[in-house]
Amino acid sequence: MLNLPPRIGSRLNSTQFSNLYTFLVAARHLSFSRAADELCLTPSAVSHRIGRLESALSIRLFQRLTRQVCLTEEGERIFRILQDAVGELSEALQQTSQAEVAGAIALYVRPSVAQCWLVPRLGDFAERYPLVSLDIRVGNDNADFRTRNIDLALYYANGDFPGLVSHKLMGEKMAPVCSPEYARRHGLLDNPDNLRQCTLLHDSLAWDNAAYDAEWTLWATQQGMAALLPERGITFDRSDLCVIAAMNHAGVAIGRQQLVQKRIDQGELILPFGSFTQSGHYDYYLVHPPHDPMPRRLQVFIDWLHECASQSLLINGAEPLSG
């Protein structure tokens, strides 16, 4: 329901609804020129529409800076109200409780998780929900849900997401992994002392604000082996690239169980020092802005991801998350 403040709701007409939608698009992009591209208008027309809206409502919605615009406090509040209202309206127009789930979902996910865990499972979702269109985007930065029009993000993180809703999807374990040949060549089996002679493969962006060697440092500290770590290494910005390098005898990587178990089962990688251990405070989380109610297309996708995670945890010998 469009729950605008009384002084706004009492002044709306068809023109103001058009102007409100123009404001919604401009506020999402924080750019009049990008809003103009989306709306097939000129930047000047967007500016005039918003100016007329501000004048009619006696509210200043944007601060105009030299090369950008930003929302005022009142503008931010109106933007969030409109965003929720448009989402509810779209949901109501597209679906009834008896209709098939339909619509588009934009998911932002870390590259390694997409490559090794998510993408191989997407065929099942497409078969179950053929009217839902998935837009999978990958990157190592945190998603800006407003400006990038993202519905949901999947992170490997510590669970701290101020102002957002998060669901723990599944826990993670980690351990050093390498190819059988590399382990034999360096005498690594059950002999971590020989790590001193090895090349370490680092994921420099394992989580937000991580040091380039954060995963190796975390594992070695937990095992009391920090003194064994050599300085020689190769650095990547993706965990899956570390794994590919390890499979091709380039060194030893920290493997995350959910991402490498298949390679271990196929004999392409081994655990030279024994089993996986808990990764500390870092697990997989689904993150999104607050919704009331949750759009049906997002809820079925979240439920499906939890189902996949439960199956993955059971296959890998861990207990699925409750709830």
Image: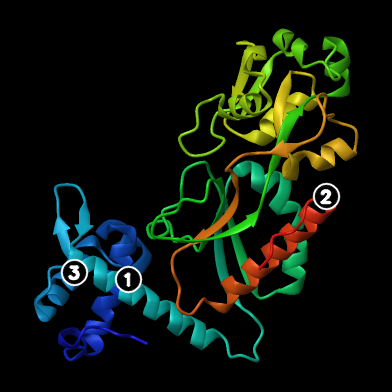
Task: Report the quarter where the C terminus lies.
Answer: bottom right
For the view shown, which residue lies furthest in the front direction?
224
Report the front residue among 198 and 69: 198
- Element at label 1: helix
**Disc 3 to disc 2: CB gap under 8 Å:** no
Q: Which comes before the other along the chain, label 3 or label 2?
A: 3
- For badge 1, the amino acid type reads Arg
Residue 45 visible? The answer is no
- For badge 3, the amino acid type reads Glu
Identify the residue at horizontal 58%, vertical 54% (top origin).
285
Residue ID for mark 2: 317
Residue ID for mark 3: 74
* Residue 177 on image: x %, y %: 77, 28
- Element at label 2: loop
Report the front residue among 52 and 153: 153
Q: CA distance from mark 1 to mark 2?
A: 43 Å
**Disc 1 to disc 2: CB gap under 8 Å:** no
For the view shown, which residue lies furthest in the top direction?
197
Identify the residue at horizontal 13%, vertical 75% (top origin).
52
Report the front residue among 47 and 118: 118
User: Callout 1: few (<14), some (14-19), or many (20+) C-alpha neighbours within 10 Å?
Assistant: some
Identify the residue at horizontal 44%, vertical 69% (top origin).
290
Residue ID for mark 1: 80
Q: Which comes before the other along the chain, label 1 or label 2?
A: 1
Question: Splitting the image into 4 quarters, where does residue 292 fall?
Answer: bottom left
